[in-house]
Amino acid sequence: MKTSVNLTRREKEVLDGVLRSLANKEIASELNLSERTVKFHVSSLLSKFKVHSRMELMREAAHGAMKPVTPPAMNAPSHPLSFARNTEMPGKILHSGKVLPLARRMMA
């Protein structure tokens, strides 16, 4: 069994963006950080999870190597890597219970 990974608050926020398949620039915009700071946190996450890519990071985080985190939502889900609609802020995704497949990019 894997050991839990201790993450800082900011690493958890950045990981949430990575799990939602956001680019560093999008994560930086959401968290009001510089893109360089987000890159730093992503590198730290890769190191802590002992992986070499964002895809591996997503897989490891989804398999529960991370300690459960209660999101700052009204109704906290039972599983930290689940997704649900956020009725307070439409368009935002909250953790709720299902792991969603990644979107495929259309080639032009």
Image (cartoon, helix red, strand yellow):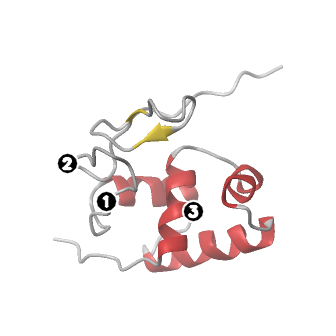
Q: Mark on residue 14?
A: 3
Tell me the residue at 58%/44% (across/down): 21
In the image, taking residue 19 as reference, residue 64 lies left or right, namely left
Callout 3 crowding tier (Cα within 10 Å): few <14, some 14–19, many ≥20: many
Tell me the residue at 47%/60% (across/down): 57
Q: Secondary structure at mark 2?
A: loop
Q: Which of the pair 75/23 is nearer the observer?
A: 75
- Which residue occupies the extreme left position in the image? 1
Find out whether the residues at labels 2 and 1 contact each other: C-beta distance under 8 Å. no
| Coordinates of residue 70 in the picture (x, y in percent) | 31, 59
Callout 2 crowding tier (Cα within 10 Å): few <14, some 14–19, many ≥20: few
Per the model, the C-alpha gap separating discs 3 and 1 is: 15 Å
Q: Mark on residue 70?
A: 1
In the image, taking residue 89 as reference, residue 64 lies left or right, namely left
Closer mark to the observer between disc 3 and disc 1: 1
Residue 87 lies in quadrant: top left
Find out whether the residues at labels 2 and 3 contact each other: C-beta distance under 8 Å. no
Q: Which residue is mark 2?
A: 78
